[in-house]
Amino acid sequence: MAPEADFDEATWRERLAGHRREKDEFLADHPQSPIPPGDREDFEGLAYYDLDPEYRVVARFSRAQSPETVKLETTRGPPAEYERVAVLGFPLGGDHHTLAAFRVEGEDSLFVPFTDETNGEETYERGRYLDVDVPADAETGDDVVVDCNLAYNPFCAYSDTFSCVLPPAENHVDVPVRAGERVRE
C-alpha cells in the first residue's frame, strides 16, 4: 500500500483508469499520435500492467544545489539538453534506489527517464519515462510521490520517425518495475 495516511486507493484507481483511457483515445485518433496512420484503425489500446499501489512510492526529494545542464543521448540525431535539478530516493523491491530528475522547459513536472530489469522483455527495450509532480517550493528532504503505474513508453517505441531521449546510466533501477505501460505479448 502507498504510505500516505490520506491515500484513497479507489479514487487513485479511478483516476489512473481514466488516464489510460484518454491516452488510448489520443493514440487511436489524434493527428499527432505516434501510431502510424495505417495502424490506427486496428489499434486496440496499449498494454498495461495491472494497477498496483506497491509501485506508488514516497520518494525523498533532493534538490540540486547547482542544477547542471546535461546532454542526454537520443535514439536519432544529436543529444538533447536538459537541466538536472534533483535526485529522488525511494524504496522499491526491498532496495533503495535513486533517479535523477530533469527540468523540461515549459513543464511543471520533472522528467524522469529510467530503465529497469523489464526492458527488452516486458517493456520497451530502451526504457520508459515518468513525469513527477513536485511543488515549486519543494526543499531537500521533502516527500514526493513517484507513481510507477504512470510509467510510459516514449513515442519512438511506436514509430522510428521520432527521436527520443535515452535514460542515462545513473537512472537504472536494478529490480523489475512491473507497473505502467508494457509491450504487447
Image: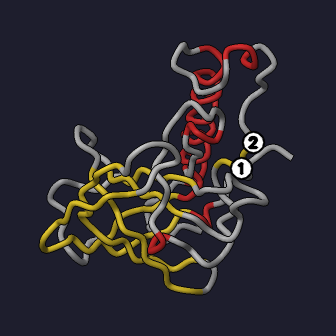
* Number of marks: 2
Residue 105: quadrant of the picture? top left
- Vertical placement of 149 versus 95: above or below? above
- Residue found 71% across the figure and 50% down from its top: 182
**Residue 8 at what x, y percent from top left?**
52, 54
Dot 2 alpha-carbon crowd within 10 angstroms: few under 14, some 14 to 19, many 20 or more: some
Which of the two residues, 95 or 2, is positioned nearer the viewer here?
A: 95
Q: Amino acid at mark 1?
A: Arg
Q: On the rendered structure, is 55 left or right of 168?
A: right
Which of the two residues, 4 or 183, is positioned nearer the viewer here?
A: 183
Q: On the rendered structure, is 108 left or right of 151?
A: left
- Vertical placement of 129 versus 145: above or below? above
Cα separation between marks 2 and 1: 5 Å
In the picture of the structure, the residue carrying the numbered disc 2 is 47
Q: Residue furthest front?
A: 77
Q: Secondary structure at mark 2?
A: strand
Q: Amino acid at mark 2?
A: Ala
- Residue found 36% across the figure and 68% down from its top: 100
- Residue found 50% across the figure and 84% down from its top: 96
In the picture of the structure, the residue carrying the numbered disc 1 is 182
**Residue 33 at what x, y percent from top left?**
57, 22
Instruction: Please report contact status of discs 2 and 1: CB closer than 8 Å, yes or no.
Output: yes
Q: Residue furthest bottom?
A: 95
Q: Secondary structure at mark 1?
A: strand
Which of the two residues, 124 or 181, is positioned nearer the viewer here?
A: 124
**Residue 74 at what x, y percent from top left?**
46, 50
Which of the two residues, 114 or 79, is positioned nearer the viewer here?
A: 79
Dot 1 alpha-carbon crowd within 10 angstroms: few under 14, some 14 to 19, many 20 or more: many
